[in-house]
Amino acid sequence: MLFDRDDTIAYTDQAVYRDAARWAASRYGLDASHVGHVLAAVWADHTSPDRESSWWHLRTLSEEEAFWSEYGRELTRRLELPADAAPEWLARFPYEAYMKPVSGARDVLSALRTRGLKIGVLSNTLPSIDRTLVAVGLADLIDVAIATCAVGIHKPEPGAYHHAAATLGVEPREILFIDDKAENVAAARAVGMQARLIDLSGQDGDAIHSLAEVLDIVDARWEAVGQ
């Protein structure tokens, strides 16, 4: 089994952004709405693959640490706060604090483990993927966690999937891959993986709409093999 992370087994809780904005407003005497707009703007500036300062170009944990330091400095600069406000802010609201597990994620991953399956995560994300999986309470159920930043190859590039299969120690054809982006699902199928799209909002009729459906897919495959 191979899962994407964001909007598949975990999600970004927008309520935490509001909590961060309210905390900063109270702590530094700012307007919460203004803080929220600045938070969104600074993050957007650091997420575009075309920008040299983007997290897409990070390769190591030390590079990521420097990235967050620069992010904190930019955030406090735009809010006209003293530089020493950045470490306090980032300590209170680190990256992983914004993430929550998807409903039923732990139960589904546990059930897959009882079926004897290896579980991997392949995510277009920063090198600190292990820390985020600990934060959402799923790390102990995952055999391999791959951040594409650390590999230097992002989905939907074929190399990302081949790297994941090799790290799991299986052939691509043996993997069922679950992702919330159609282009990533198509790329996985192109390298020989079985893959399904997941849409937790329930709007895409061609997708599964909950992690629990993964168990049905796995069990149906087993029954087909048994026949």
Image (cartoon, rainbow, N blue to C red):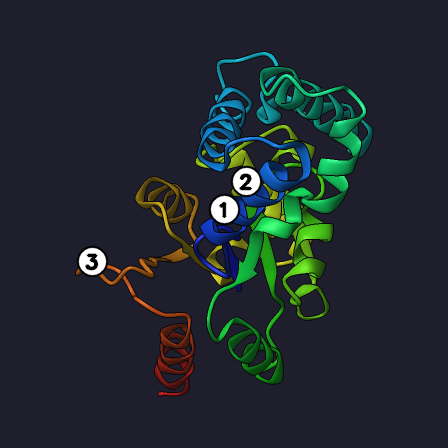
Q: Name above or below for residue 96 compared with residue 205.
A: above
C-beta proximity under 8 Å, tags 1 and 2:
yes
Residue under circle 3?
Answer: 203
Residue under circle 2?
Answer: 21
Q: Residue at x 36, y 80 (%)?
A: 216
Which of the two discs, 2 and 3, labels the residue nearer the N terminus?
Answer: 2
Amino acid carrying label 2: it is Ala
Residue 187: image quadrant is top left
Q: What separation in Å lies between label 1 and label 3 (alpha carbons)? A: 26 Å
Amino acid carrying label 3: it is Gln
In depth, the one of 43 and 222 nearer the eye is 43
Please say whether residue 60 is visible from this viewpoint: no
In depth, the one of 118 and 76 nearer the eye is 76
Residue 123: image quadrant is top right
Q: Position of residue 148 (x, y in %)?
A: 60, 37
SS label for mark 1? helix
Q: Left or right: 158 with respect to 122? A: left
Q: Dot 1: within a 10 Å radius of its alpha carbon, few (fewer than 14), some, or many (20 or more) residues? A: some
